[in-house]
Image: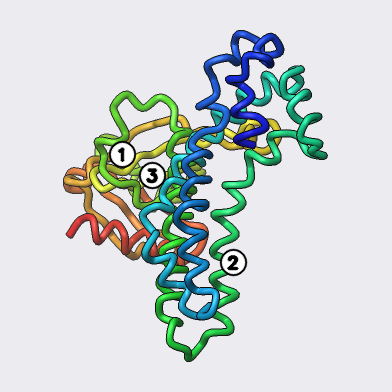
Amino acid sequence: VLQGYAAEMDNPLMADLISPELQNKKDILFGNMEEIYHFHNRIFLRELENYVEYPELVGRCFLDQMEDFQIYEKYCQNKPRSESLWRQFSDSVFFQECQRKLDHKLSLDSYLLKPVQRITKYQLLLKEMLKYSKNCEGAEDLQEALTSILGILKAVNDSMHQIAITGYDGNLNELGKLLMQGSFNVWTDHKKGHTKVKDLARFKPMQRHLFLHEKAVLFCKKREENGEGYEKAPSYSYKHSLNMAAVGITENVKGDAKKFEIWYNAREEVYIIQAPTPEVKATWVNEIRKVLT
């Protein structure tokens, strides 16, 4: 891909096949694939080769390079931009010519998906290795490596959702780290109105997608997009946010193990939040509690 497509975009002999709108878009189309390639080729592969005789110790290899794996997050965040560019120019003569020269059965977009598939494959490989390494020397490292890779996958997944937030005025980066995101049923009860919580609970809930940052929790409305693959990725229109400094939490709401309350400014505003499962609720309550303490 790097030689047969990316480098060809700079090849003077191919210049007349590239439409002007595509000319300076190499970075958008390929993201940081070259960085990923060099990491694997120069660093990670060599590390792995050191463990050929001791496969059970390979977890150490992942742990030593864990920071480098964050380059995948950058790649995945750029993927929607890359996809939409590809859709505009997928039938261009330039891409057809590159594919013909490479004798590839599949078009470029299949290969641009590889890094996304690769980072998800590592956790499967590590799980498989753990299965056969129960009581051996490297088992703890393998477990830690798996946990770290799952952490990176969660960060990649969360940030893919976060870049789809629309209509937020400020800078999301100023809200601190994104800790959790997910969809919930939400009922509101504000002092200004006259409804009691129990009257309110009869009303239809709002569907809201919540983003929990260190400094604020954002309430968004999910909009499904029509289309294939990444085009299907939903977008989230921003509705409002609560500053975590003024938030309180009630962990149990009578009559429903999936509900908890977030309240604001000494219960001036109360949000009853229903998670899809009691487990999801527990995870969120724990994260919110950590932030508040």
Residue 124 - label: 2
Considering only vertical position in the picture, is 53 above or below 245? Answer: below
**Tag 3: Cα neighbours inside 10 Å, few (<14), some, or many (≥20)?**
many
Q: Is residue 39 left or right of residue 232?
A: left
Disc 1 residue type (three-letter): His
Residue 211 - label: 3
Residue name at image x 41 percent, y 45 percent: 210
The answer to whether any part of residue 162 appears in the image is yes
Disc 2 residue type (three-letter): Leu
Pick whichever of labels 1 and 2 is earlier in the sequence: 2
- Which callout, 3 or 2, points to the residue nearer the camera? 2
The answer to whether any part of residue 206 appears in the image is no
Residue 229 - label: none
Q: Secondary structure at mark 2?
A: helix
Q: Name the foreground residue: 249 vs 122.
A: 122
**Tag 2: Cα neighbours inside 10 Å, few (<14), some, or many (≥20)?**
few
Quadrant housing the N terminus: top right
**Rendered location of residue 174, percent (x, y):** 24, 35
Q: Is residue 135 left or right of residue 29?
A: left
Spatial CA distance of label 3 from label 2 is 27 Å
Pick whichever of labels 1 and 3 is earlier in the sequence: 1
**Rendered location of residue 115, percent (x, y):** 57, 47
Residue at the disc numbered 1:
194
**Rendered location of residue 217, percent (x, y):** 31, 43
Spatial CA distance of label 1 from label 3 is 29 Å
Residue name at image x 29 percent, y 56 percent: 288
Q: Secondary structure at mark 3?
A: strand
